[in-house]
Image (cartoon, grey):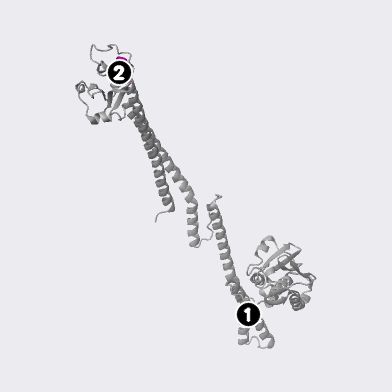
Amino acid sequence: MRSLWFKLTAALVLVTLLGVGLSVLIPTVVTVRSFQTFVSSSRVREREGMVEALAIYYQEQRSWDGLDLLVSPRPGHMGHGMGPMTAPRMLRAWPFQVADEQGVVIAGPRTEDIGQQLSQGQIGASMPIEVDGREVGYFVHGPTVFTLREPEQAFLQRLSQIIVPVGMVACAVAILLGLFLTWQLTDPLRKLKTAAQGIAAGDLSQRVDIKSKDELGDLGRAFNEMAENLAHAEELRQNMTADIAHELRTPLSVIRGNLEAILDGVFQPTKENVASIHKQAILLSRLVDDLQELALADAGQLRIEREPTDLASLIERTISATNPRAEQGGVSVVTDLAHNLPILSADPQRLSQVMGNLLDNALRHSPQGGTITVRANEVSDGVQVDVVDQGPGLSAEELSLVFERFYRGDKARTRATGGAGLGLAIVKQLVEAHGGRVWAESFEGESTTFSFTLPVGSLETT
């Protein structure tokens, strides 16, 4: 399988060769053609100048006598009174013939052509020489008049010798630069590929170091964030598995131990001993129910049966059910509920569970003689409920973990005294299932506030 670097490099080389090739070929062709056009135009002007010079010669001499000596000079005839006439002398460098008005060749590069009669076709292709409006002769150019002269050919050759090497050098530089750029471009992708393969093999510690600020940099940062989330999720999964095993082991061990003691005759099946086993069975059942609710929430199957709900009355009922435990622990629960709270379209049983879990959590952390305050107010985005305790507070790290499953600030607490660490996780799932949000704020050593809101969309008109 060919790599992306190979494909990009091949494409770049192809485009470079095509671009440089065209940039060399097109200017060369245009230059050559333009030069040839220029040469042709120059030759036409030169022929016109020659015809004009011949006309002047004839007008001065009143005949063509001596013209052949200027074109093909013989020994002893140089000068002959015609030396100053430089224009006709220029004709010697050209393959031409001059004929008189009858079409008889009177001068040319070859002496054997003199005296020959031109054909009608040759006369038609020639340029007439006119003096005083009368044709006195014909200027006949040879077939090679439009061929490039040696200096002109040398110019085009030098041009090719310059353009082609320059094009090749430019092509080589472009390819080398392209190879470097494509390597730099695909290097982050190679790093991402290696890291992704590592994660696929189970190594969640893989990270990529991409410092660019373009889309590849964003991709690298997103990959690292994904890897962090995967590692965190794997850590939570492992911790949850260990916590579930621990939480199930404790009540099961008590139940098993008590039953074995009864079977062995160590304990009598009295009401008190059976009640102890029943209590552990209730704890075990509650744990299983909590796990089932979280599983349903994760699967998006948590049922919310909405109905008109008076939030203030619901809070009062939940506090009344909690007061016996609060009084037993020497903790007082006070309320600060706004008047005329709107009627919510919510599941009252689920909201009672939310309030019960928050109050249960506050009771566990409130010292004897402390106070728990429950506030409810209408805010811009709905209704907000706050549960404030006077416990030891939470650190910033604990605040970031407090809604995680099986998280307990005091690892030494058992489920009987500190819960399994599922209550706040369930609160989060239930509030979010209602379309709300939940958060915690704390002043370490003073108090902690757990708050949740229900959005405006869940309100009904009273």
Q: Of the residues tagged 2 and 1, which is closer to the observer?
A: 2
Location of residue 4 with respect to 165 vertically, above or below: below
Front residue of 330 and 18: 18
Q: Is residue 59 magenta?
A: yes
For label 1, the residue is 285
Q: Is residue 277 magenta?
A: no
Relative image position of residue 207 (x, y in whole percent): 53, 56
Task: Give the crowd class for mark 2: few <14, some 14-19, many >=20 residues within 10 Å.
Answer: some
Location of residue 144 with respect to 14 vertically, above or below: above
For label 2, the residue is 58
Front residue of 379 and 178: 379
Q: Main secondary structure of the magenta part?
A: helix
User: CA separation, marks 2 and 1?
Assistant: 133 Å
Q: Are marks 2 and 1 in contact (CB under 8 Å)?
A: no
Relative image position of residue 369 (x, y in whole percent): 80, 71
Q: What is the three-letter code of the residue carrying label 2?
A: Tyr
Front residue of 266 and 103: 103
The mark nearer the N terminus, 2 or 1, is 2
Location of residue 91 with respect to 389 vertically, above or below: above
Element carrying mark 2: helix
The answer to whether residue 128 is visible is yes
Front residue of 210 and 101: 101
Relative image position of residue 454 (x, y in whole percent): 69, 69
Q: Quadrant of residue 81?
A: top left
Magenta residues, start to end: 54-62
Relative image position of residue 400 (x, y in whole percent): 66, 63
Q: Is residue 375 left or right of residue 84?
A: right
The answer to whether residue 143 is visible is no
Task: Give the crowd class for mark 1: few <14, some 14-19, many >=20 residues within 10 Å.
Answer: some
Residue lying at the far front of the rendered structure = 133
